[in-house]
């Protein structure tokens, strides 16, 4: 591909420009899935008939691996087109895995266009960078825009919200959640300093962070970090209480007793009485 094509594409797409700046991209790189290049190109050209396939193929090949608990922003972000390429390659390999397991792909409930490999891919990657509803979509979806407002009333009492959590364990990719048992909850509380967050946004931050592969302890701290950053205060308290891990409750030991609680806090919430008070709200 000619360099001039890349320059035109970059001019049209700010996100791509940022990605290229981040990597100092070479015009063409070798990638681990070059044997699929023609297959992916065919699908790409149907989806994006006016776009230059090689630009995004290179972007995909330049994208570094990132942790199952992180978002793609940790490696510089991705364009919608490169995300599409990632999905095509992923779906292809789910088809191969099903064949390896001797699953009859002529079964209309499994095979065919947009069959089970397509659906699993969607569940693990999201359908677009706006898709924040899938089990692992938080690895790829855009960071939610969080409005914060000046704390004009100078209020210094905790703002607390109980929410639900859906996440998957990084060991089995089996869901763990507040939804599987009565009384389970996730609680997020913070004491505003200079900034007050739009309250409806707390759930969106938590969803964005949760919908990745996690250990519950690490998820708890990651939620703390994101709320702390958004609200610009260390006085944040996160408690995940009574979550059921399906890798334990539905398989292996099939323990029905197991539920797991974890918490993380900082600032004024080092006071145990304050944490107790907030939990009682
Ligand atoms: Zn597990």
Image: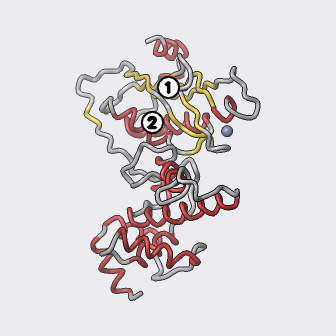
Residue that carries the numbered disc 2 in the rendered image: 206
Find the residue positioned furthest to the right: 253
At horizontal 59% and vertical 22% (from top left) the residue drawn is 242
Cα distance, mark 2 to mark 1? 10 Å
Q: Nearer the viewer, residue 109 or 45?
A: 109
Q: Residue furthest bottom?
A: 2
Say which element carries label 2.
helix
The residue at the point 50 percent across, 27 percent down is: 238
Q: Quadrant of ligand 1?
A: top right
Q: Which dot marks residue 125?
A: none
> If you read the primary sequence from the N terminus, does the residue marked by circle 2 or circle 1 appear first?
1
- In the displayed image of the protein, which residue is found farthest to the left? 152
Q: How many marks?
A: 2
Ligand 1 within 8 angstroms of badge 2 C-beta: no
Q: Secondary structure at mark 1?
A: strand
Vertical placement of 106 versus 62: above or below? above
Residue 7, x across and y down, in percent: 33, 80
> Residue shown at 47%/11% (left/top)?
280
């Amino acid at each position: 591909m000619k360099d001039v094509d890349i320059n035109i594409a970059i001019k049209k797409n700010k996100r791509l420009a940022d990605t290229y700046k981040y990597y100092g991209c070479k015009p063409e790189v070798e990638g681990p899935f070059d044997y699929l290049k023609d297959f992916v190109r065919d699908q790409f050209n149907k989806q994006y008939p006016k776009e230059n396939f090689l630009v995004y193929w290179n972007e995909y090949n330049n994208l570094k691996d990132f942790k199952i608990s992180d978002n793609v922003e940790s490696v510089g972000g991705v364009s919608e087109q490169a995300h599409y390429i990632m999905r095509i390659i992923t779906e292809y390999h789910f088809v191969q895995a099903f064949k390896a397991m001797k699953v009859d792909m002529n079964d209309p409930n499994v095979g065919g266009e947009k069959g089970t490999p397509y659906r699993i891919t969607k569940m693990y990657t999201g359908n677009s960078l706006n898709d924040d509803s899938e089990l692992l979509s938080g690895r790829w979806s855009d960071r939610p825009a969080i409005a914060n407002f000046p704390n004009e009333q100078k209020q210094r009492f905790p703002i607390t919200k109980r929410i639900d959590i859906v996440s998957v364990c990084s060991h089995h990719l089996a869901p763990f959640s507040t939804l599987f048992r009565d009384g389970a909850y996730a609680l997020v509380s913070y004491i505003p300093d200079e900034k007050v967050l739009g309250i409806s946004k707390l759930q969106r931050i938590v969803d964005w962070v949760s919908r990745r592969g996690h250990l519950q302890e690490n998820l708890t701290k990651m939620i703390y970090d994101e709320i702390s950053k958004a609200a610009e205060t260390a006085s944040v308290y996160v408690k995940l209480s009574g979550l059921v891990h399906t890798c334990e409750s539905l398989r292996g030991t099939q323990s029905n007793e197991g539920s797991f609680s974890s918490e993380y806090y900082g600032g004024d919430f080092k006071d145990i009485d304050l944490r107790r008070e907030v939990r009682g709200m």
